[in-house]
Image: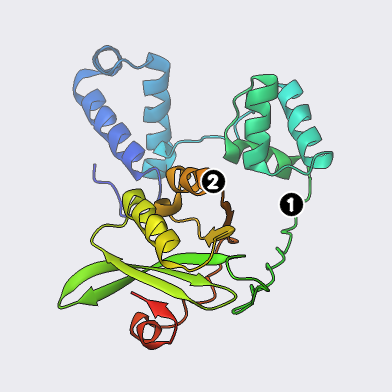
Amino acid sequence: MAVQSRKSPYRGKVRERLAVLAYVTVHGVAPVAQRFGLDRKTVRTWRDRYRAHREAGLVPRYPTRRPRRIPAETVALIAQARTEFRYGASRTRFWLIRLHERAVATKTITRICEDLGLPPLQRVKRRRAPRQLTLFEKPNPGDSVQVDVTVVTLAGTKAYQYTACDDCTRYRVLRLYRHLDQRSSLDFLAEVRRRLPFAIRRVQTDHGTEFAFAFVLAVEQAGIRHRYIRPRCSLSFTQESPRKALRRPGSIT
């Protein structure tokens, strides 16, 4: 009994049932049922289907959609989350777990909403954040000092250039470090406070790990305010190359 070539998801099942029927022709129904752990009625049904329709009769006759095992109360909660709260499948799943202690898969929630005829949620267009000004000035020296890090290569060696720029006078302090971490940031902060000829009232940085809690705490302990820029926005002086910044007047190395 050779299995015909067909593109069917059940060709493995058909091959297994053909092997069982081949054993039936030699030993009978009862030994086959005992050997393979099958019911005798099932073996006879396969044999009769094979005699009537050949291999097509061995294709499993599963229902197109099995009965849903989700309780009706859970289905009602899913409908409430979609219609009243406008929750998607993922948010509905967490809502059911945390508030109602009911675990339902995300795909199951999506299928239930489709069966109930609930319309899919429309994607809300996110408003783009206004572009940050590339250059701005402060009225007094020290009102805002921007600090950022740029990766540079010197003589084939990778280094990290820390740069501080005052938004009023455009004075700059630059220093190279071998490592990019909070220890280098703290050392550079002390260097900036020593080099600038005026008091610093605010320091502005990005959200890099080198400007994490220890750096912010050191800034505040020095009596200086700290401000993070908006995510995905660059500081105003970072668009210039490091070599060009070194050639500008007012740079302190």
The residue nearer to you, when weighing 61 against 100, is 100
Question: Mark 2 Cα within 10 Å, few/some/many (few <14, many 20+)?
Answer: few
Badge nearest the viewer, 1 or 2? 2
Q: Position of residue 13 (x, y in %)?
A: 35, 37
Q: Position of residue 187 (x, y in %)?
A: 34, 54
Q: Is residue 26 left or right of residue 53?
A: left
The residue nearer to you, when weighing 236 against 53, is 236
Q: Amino acid at mark 1?
A: Pro
Q: Is residue 47 above or below residue 87?
A: above
Q: Amino acid at mark 2?
A: Glu
Q: Position of residue 124 (x, y in %)?
A: 74, 59
The residue nearer to you, when weighing 56 against 16, is 16
Q: Secondary structure at mark 2?
A: helix
Q: Is residue 243 left or right of residue 248?
A: left
Q: Which circle marks residue 87 in the picture?
A: none
Task: Estimate the spatial distance between the alpha carbons at disc 1 and disc 2, rounded to whole Å.
Answer: 49 Å
* Residue 64 visible somewhere in the drawing: no
Residue displayed at 23% across by 26% down: 25
Q: Position of residue 59 (x, y in %)?
A: 42, 40
Q: Is residue 135 left or right of residue 152?
A: right
Q: Which circle marks residue 120 in the picture?
A: 1
Quadrant occupied by the N terminus: top left
- Which residue bears the numbered disc 2? 220
**Mark 1 or mark 2: whose residue is earlier in sequence:** 1
